[in-house]
Amino acid sequence: GMALSPDGTLVAVAARESMSHAYEGETVSIIDVARAAAGRADAEVARVPVGGSDDSQHSRPFGVGFSEDGSFLVASCFRSNAISILDVQAALVGQPSERHRLYPEAPVGDPSRPRGIAVCGRYACVIGGAKGGPGSSLVWLIDIEAGTVAGTVCGVGNESYFLAAVRPAAN
């Protein structure tokens, strides 16, 4: 997955996997759009490990989403069942940037398998859930700044991967 920062200057890309050989990723790249458009070799301005990879398992980042003010980046990590919340400015200057790492729970002990992300105000809505039949997906509402799971909605979709946030029309 990938996401554009609210001001349009940065793109975040999840290094999910290689399609040419057996490899799952463990990083998120942040790309400067203007540098990339100019064809500069230094367009990738940060590459950040996410989701707690180890020697036996890569985190396999799946989705990314910027907070509404662009100061945080949320990454879902399918294989490690984690959600990482990164401080964007810290990442851009090469400092440790993972502010929070969450391991949201799924019902009955299934792996959480977080995937798609949509940002709604102070929350990142992250869809996940193990493979299953109808109603096998769930959505976690993640309080981005606090780094907590504020709520969980179960029984939505069938192994769903993506979601979108839509602002209601003003009355």
Image (cartoon, rainbow, N blue to C red):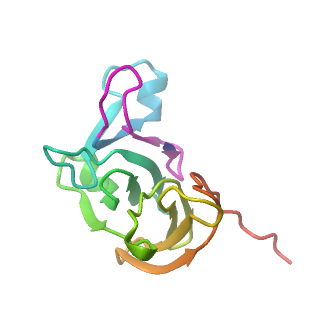
Q: Which residue is painted at 47% across and 34% down in the image? A: 33
Q: Main secondary structure of the magenta part?
A: loop
Quadrant hosting residue 96: bottom left
* Magenta stretch encompasses residue 13: yes
Which image quadrant is residue 72 in? bottom left
Considering depth in this image, is 43 or 127 the residue closer to the camera? Answer: 127
Q: Is residue 121 above or below residue 34?
A: below
In the rendered view, tell whether residue 15 sits above or below residue 171. above
The residue most toward the right is: 171
Would you say 70 lies left or right of 94 here?
Answer: right
Q: Where residue 120 sits: x, y (%)?
A: 58, 68
Extreme-left residue of the structure: 55
The answer to which of 110 and 52 lies nearer the viewer is 110
As for residue 36 lying within the magenta part, the answer is no
- Quadrant for the C terminus, please: bottom right
| Residue range of the region highlighted in magenta in the rendering | 3-25
Q: Position of residue 148 (x, y in %)?
A: 37, 77
**Residue 140, x across and y down, in percent:** 49, 71
Which residue is at 41% across, 63% downward? 112
Residue at figure coordinates x 30%, y 38% from the top left: 25
Please tell me which residue is depicted at 33% across the width and 54% down the height of the picture. Answer: 88
Residue 47 at what x, y percent from top left? 27, 40
Residue 146 quadrant: bottom left
Q: Left or right of 66: which side holds 169? A: right
Residue sitting nearer the eye, 156 or 163 = 156
